[in-house]
Amino acid sequence: MTQPDLLSSAQLAHSLQLLHQQTPLVHCMTNDVVQTFTANVLLALRASPAMVIDATEAAQFAGFADALLINVGTLTCDRRDAMLAAVEAARLAGTPWTLDPVAVGALTLRSAFCQQLLSLQPAAIRGNASEILALANQTAGGRGVDSVHQADAALSAAQQLAQAHQTLVAVTGEVDYITDGTRTLAVAGGSPLMTRVVGTGCALSAVVAAFASLPGDRLLHVAAACRVMSLAGEQAARSATGPGSFVAAFLDNLWTLEVAA
Ligand SMILES: Nc1ncnc2c1ncn2[C@@H]1O[C@H](COP(=O)(O)OP(=O)(O)OP(=O)(O)O)[C@@H](O)[C@H]1O
Ligand SMILES: Cc1ncsc1CCO
Ligand SMILES: [Mg+2]
């Protein structure tokens, strides 16, 4: 395998500056556990979150939002139907949508739904290693919502998924890999504390959705989304004394993030 590329600080600065300028409106259909944290992460990055979930309203809203996030963490049959209506409306309107296949694999409802969604042209997919392996039908999944695999073990599954469905895949962990099936970038950094508070991955998927709406090279923008989160995470870990203070410092670091080009 050829070595993955690294994201330049100039590209990171460019993507972040674009995000701050465009302040995308991000339609989040996400799980019950991470709603507030996800909205706070997007707000700290100057994006605008809106959690619209009724099927009729979601279809309407997906038509004029800048980006749509589908996260199946607390899926129900009604939510599945509402998410499908939103994805269909997003596709009609040309709104890029991002999938977070939380805990895909062992559970039938979400696994069948995620497979169905793969044929509906997501702009990006963001998951942990166990989720990406399960989505590519290579394992039965992780330990609930947590990964039991390292991201590099899922890299070829990510590349294969991206190629098969003409999309971008970000597989995250200690190192994140972002691929379109041909080009691959690696993003390091972050902190193990990011796995000790709930929702950093889910919020990252919302951030990926926001960056995927920016004009220009989407692969580089999605890699920038991953780096923005890992940078805020590693900075927060320096001052945090545990998960509670980490969350506050993480949001503050997203807010003040400055990247020298
Ligand atoms: N061991 C680690 N060291 C540094 N950063 C990490 C580590 N594990 C995860 N991260 C970072 O944490 C963030 C979330 O990634 P992760 O793969 O844990 O998502 P997830 O399992 O979907 O999370 P969740 O389900 O809690 O939302 C990413 O920014 C990733 O880079
Ligand atoms: C803990 C948890 N359970 C369902 S979704 C979720 C958030 C992390 O993915
Ligand atoms: Mg997750």
Image: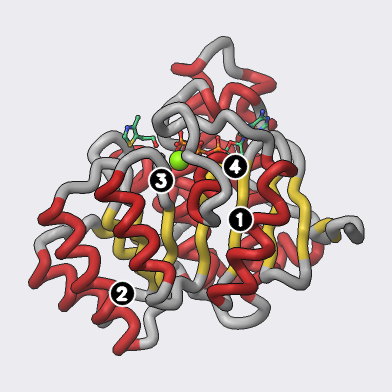
Which element is circle 2 on?
A: loop
Residue plotted at (31% across, 88% down): 93
Which element is circle 4 on?
A: helix
Distance of mark 3 from mark 4, alpha carbons? Answer: 11 Å
Q: Quadrant of the C terminus?
A: bottom right
**Label 3 vs label 2, nearer the camera:** 3
* Residue bearing mark 4: 129
* Of the image marks 4 and 1, the number of the one nearer the N terminus: 4
Q: Residue 168, how many percent across, how many down?
A: 59, 68
The amino acid type of the residue labelled 3 equals Val
The amino acid type of the residue labelled 2 equals Ala
Assess mark 3: CB under 8 A from ligand 3?
no
Mark drawn on residue 170: 1
* Of the image marks 3 and 4, the number of the one nearer the N terminus: 3
Assess mark 4: CB under 8 A from ligand 1?
yes
Distance of mark 2 from mark 1, alpha carbons? Answer: 22 Å
Q: Residue furthest top?
A: 241
Which element is circle 3 on?
A: loop
**Label 2 vs label 1, nearer the camera:** 1
* Residue bearing mark 3: 104
Distance of mark 4 from mark 1, alpha carbons? Answer: 9 Å
Distance of mark 3 from mark 2, alpha carbons? Answer: 26 Å
* Of the image marks 3 and 2, the number of the one nearer the N terminus: 2
Mark 1 packing: few (<14 Cα in 10 Å), some, or many (20+)?
A: many
The amino acid type of the residue labelled 1 equals Ala
Residue plotted at (25% across, 49% down): 109
The amino acid type of the residue labelled 4 equals Ala
* Of the image marks 2 and 1, the number of the one nearer the N terminus: 2
**Label 4 vs label 2, nearer the camera:** 4
Q: Is residue 228 above or below residue 241?
A: below
* Residue bearing mark 2: 65
